Amino acid sequence: MKFTLSWLKQHLETDAPLDVITDKLTALGLEVEGVEDTGKALAPFVIAKVLSAEKHPNADKLRVAMVDTGKGEPVQVVCGAPNCRAGITVVFASPGAVVPATGDTLKVGAIRGVESRGMLCSERELNLSDEHNGIIELPEEAPVGTSFAAWRKLDDAVIEISLTPDRVDCAGVYGIARDLAAAGLGTLKPLDTAPAPGVFPAPVKVALETAACPQFAARVVRGVRNGPSPQWLQDKLTAVGLRPISALVDITNLMTLDQVRPLHVFDAAKVQGDLTVRESTAGETLLALNGKEYVLPAGLTVIADASGAVLSLGGIMGGESTGVSETTTNVIIEAALFEPAKVAEAGRALQIDSDARYRFERGVDPASVVSGIEQATRLVLELCGGEAGEVFVAGAEPAWRRPLTLRPARVAHLGGVDVPETDQVRILTALGFETSQKDGLIHAVPPSWRADVHGEADLVEEVLRIHGFDAIPTTSLPRDEGLPKVAVTPKQRRTATVRRLLASRGMLEAITWSFLAPETAKLFGGAPDELALLNPISADLAIMRPSVLANLAAAAGRNAARGYADLALFEVGPAFRDGSEKGQDLIAAGVRAGLAVARHWAKGTRPVDAYDAKADAIAALEAAGAPTANLVVSTDAPGWYHPGRSGCLRLGPTVLARFGELHPAVLEALDLTGPLVAFEVFLDLIPQPKKKGGTEKPKLELSAFQPISRDFAFVVEAGVEADRLIRAAKGADKALITGVQLFDVYQGPGVETGFKSIALSVTLQPVDKTLTDAEIEAVAAKVVAAVTKATGAVLRG
């Protein structure tokens, strides 16, 4: 569940800072999985205006734009977007800015011989949406030179919490605000539940023919205008990862995320007669709003009209046949209750996941049907205009009142902390329980939205949760004699896994001293005086090592001197930054020397190179659980590596590993003969993987369709890394492109001096159907456009 801080504060009157709110959420059992400070990531991006956009002298698809950034002289930018033209207002990133989508740091560069001092950005590059067919075009009145994030009100923290299945009431922002208010972190603002009066009788009736839908409310609104939703609503949805569609659809998404009240809107002109909620018959079909057609088994809950056609799958997804569009003028708003077990059954049978299914199968508030349709009606009238009819309600609100009793002493007995009875009553009342006290007992009726509270133990849990689990004193459990403690920590398991992995790659484990000579330490970045030993074993072991590589390189030299020139060594051990308690890092390091492939009469030979070390580093990171698919390669390895044959593997700003050839000067100082390649993996910096569900492997999903490969050859400036082209090609169509392979790099006759040809093989994997030639060509065009935009490369003729 994602929401923004400003969205939360629309329901919660509080001055609490972000860190206090996130700490309290976790303490309440709403575990915070992450906080994304969008404003910080978008801080370098400003609003600018394109003054002119001339054709690039050396490329047909590029434009040379002069951009007014509001900070003095116009800036020259080379842009490949098809909509780059004079007069438009855009989002500009200057050199030094980090592109959120790729993690690349912008630099001043030359694209096809023309200097470019920045970038004009698309929505995908700013992680605002998947739109990347052109740069962002802002309204003309957008103030040039000001922060884009502040102007679009994106300088807001996005909080993501992990919900347990029983807490569906907190699958909406209002429920989260209610919990925080009960915990004393502010005051809950009341909802406006005033009904929207109907000005004409309900023209559409609803018949319920299945017990899987106990209540269904429908309301017709005439004369609506369904255009884009207001910017504030679009920004809310975009911030939590939803794509704005239209005002009517966005209103239903807002009610789902804000009130845990899934809704649906039908285009009334496309509905024939009254509605019927019934069970499906085997073989009926539904073309859903996700563009897929489903053949329904018997027994699913569906909504149909007088023609008998299925219009919607109850509690999961609507159909395209009655979906709203820009031409919609009359709508039917639906608010209903669906049996959770039946919703889950239908979702599993058809393999459909939706926000509505997530909430209905966990149990939506049974008292929210009428109030939900009233709130939705007011939003429709406010944003889309029109006039509302009367509400037609079929069925009745299910019985949900469950009187419970709490013995105040049970809180201390079950929870280990004594909470005064008055505080117990206050906490339950703040959570929406109806409470009273009689004969030394607390009588409580859970609110309609808390279907998870069934007994006295549940009431005790609510009191303890709001009072604070941290207030429960720590008490050690009695331990039987001889009962073993856990012997291996997750960190130790990860270290052992990395050791086994490196050994499986043909490397021999070495254990070297944690000390070395001061002169050697200087070759690897040096060490502060506090790392010098007071009583060293010898003068050559007088200081704690700043890098594991120094001793491994020396070991490789000793092996070479004894005739073992082709070898691979690794060590997992500490390197030291300073003398503090936290001044050491656990590092998996390795070196390779000599030949990568042993001499053989039927095989060619080659010496080891930087790519061997890179492969070792990535394999070690993957074994340690690092998200290797998200790694970015940078060329800022420290000075003991060869500057042109080395790099760093980064996860955001964090360097997880370094690799490359050791610098010739370092080899000379250590009296070694190269090449010698090395890697360093910082095990302590690798994030622990988030635990999702159980430990079983995910279901293997295989496609029945043949994969397709297409080759592309691009001409690009010689200084552009091939990795940039690969990442751009992968991002061109994430749904179909499953692999991009570099298979050729060429410089020479036929390619302009200062440029190179890079050939990529792109694999497309159809999932739903066999691709047509036109669809394949469309994906190929996306690949070319994405690579050109990201790197300035052009397709080789």
Image (tube, grey):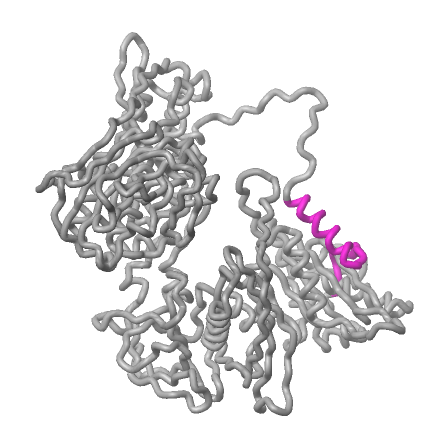
State the residue in front, 725 or 425.
725
Task: Let me know if residue 437 is in the magenta part.
Answer: no
State the residue in front, 710 or 443.
710
Quadrant where the N terminus sits is: top left
Locate residue 740, reporting x and y percent.
59, 67
The outermost residue toward the left is 199
Res. 575 image quadrant:
bottom right
State the residue in front, 220 or 26.
220
* Left/right of residue 545 with respect to residue 712 in the rendered view: right
* Left/right of residue 497 with respect to residue 344 in the rendered view: right
**What residue appears at the point 18 percent right and 44 percent down from the top-left corner?**
220
Task: Let me know if residue 499 is in the magenta part.
Answer: yes
- Residue 184 in sight: no
Locate residue 768, reporting x and y percent.
50, 55
Picture layout, residue 671 above or below residue 486:
below
Quadrant where the C terminus sits is: bottom right
**What residue appears at the point 59 percent right and 82 percent down from the top-left corner?**
757
* Left/right of residue 207 with respect to residue 625 in the rendered view: left
Res. 461 image quadrant:
top left
**What residue appears at the point 31 percent right and 56 percent down from the top-left corner?**
244
Task: Please give the range of residues in magenta.
Answer: 491-517
